[in-house]
Image (tube, helix red, strand yellow):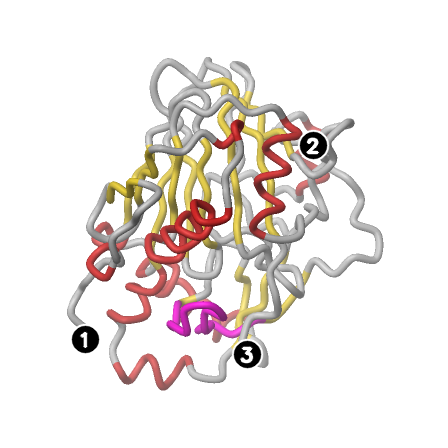
Amino acid sequence: MAELAGTSAQQISYKYIKVVPIAGALGAEIEGVDIASGVDDKTFDEIHRAWLENNIVYFRDQNLTPAQHVAFARRIGDIHPHLLNKGLENFPEIVEVRKTPTQKLNNGGRWHSDQMYTPKPAKGTMLYSRELPPVGGDTMFSNQYLAYDMISEGLKKTLGGLKGVHNGDSRNHPSGLTRMERAKSGLGTIPQVDPGDAQIVSAHPLVRTHPETGRKALYVGSHTESIEGWSHAESEPLLNYLKEFTHRPEFTCRVRWTKGMLTFWDNRCTQHFAVNDYQGHQRIIHKIMIQGDTPF
């Protein structure tokens, strides 16, 4: 197995921002940036580099309007609309992730990468905190570069050429219900839309290559239901092992939200998990996803 090493070790010095790693595996806080005041190209280039080097970055104490949130996301790339979640009326690019004091289930409470079930999954996700519980509601992240590096050479050979089949609206959920069924029953935290003819089941390599860094990462999560060409019975043992392995503690970091915090991660090499430990309190997060390309 490869020696465990995080992404922060190879960081180069920054001139326009301060980057403070939060864990050995991944994650960093970026200081010295006021997004609402505008970000010049040189500063943005360093932000982009810090994002690639750390997988997930965040900015505290931002005061953003929805329009400013959308504008900053567009600096990264085109917006990836959610095929199943309804956006805000005046800003359809933004999905409001709201958990009320009476709701028990939260959104994102399983290890996953966003939009794995689409032909071109979102390369990035950008969340902005609007309202938070007094304590709890953290988000955990896991470095899938490290997960790949740490598996055996034999397993790497086994996974080569295999594709996972990802489903965006199955009953493979703690509730046993589809998204629409959860919404109708009051269990869902986000208004749902009918995807129509949009593709919400896709097959992608279980090991994908990052198009910008060239590094390999495991690509499996809660949306992964089977291996292409394998039966569910054949797929289940290997997928269950991978799903557990991908979030070993030494691959992870935990982000504690504060109000007005913008967090941005790379779905191509990172999984995340929203911790549901704030029953009886409200949490509102605004979510934008950035269009990616076909995994290879």
Location of the N terminus by quadrant is bottom left
Q: What distance separates the C-alpha of mark 1 from that of mark 2?
A: 44 Å
Q: Secondary structure at mark 1?
A: loop
Residue 172, given in percent of the width and then of the height, sits at: 56, 51
Locate residue 25, reporting x and y percent.
24, 53
Residue bearing mark 3: 230
Q: Amino acid at mark 1?
A: Met
Circles 1 and 2: CB atoms closer than 8 Å: no
Amino acid type assigned to the residue bearing label 3 in the image: Trp
**213 or 106, which lies in front?**
213
Q: Which mark is residue 183?
A: 2
Residue name at image x 56 percent, y 18 percent: 100
What residue would you read off at disc 1?
Answer: 1
Left or right: residue 162 compared with residue 88: left
- Amino acid type of the residue that numbered disc 2 sits on in the rendered structure: Ala
Q: Is residue 15 magenta?
A: no
Callouts 3 and 1 close, C-beta under 8 Å = no
Q: In this rendering, would 281 be left or right of 254? A: right
Image: magenta residue range = 204-217
Q: How many discs mark residues in the rendered view?
A: 3
User: In this rendering, which labeled residue sits more in front, label 1 or label 2?
Assistant: 1
Q: Position of residue 87 (x, y in %)?
A: 71, 34
Packing grade of label 1 (10 A; few <14, some 14-19, many >=20) is few
Residue at figure coordinates x 56%, y 51% from the top left: 76
Marks 2 and 3 sit apart, C-alpha to C-alpha, by 32 Å
Q: Is residue 111 visible?
A: no
110 w.r.t. 277: above or below: below
Q: Residues within 10 Å of mark 3 (few under 14, many from 20)?
A: few
Labels 2, 3: front one = 2
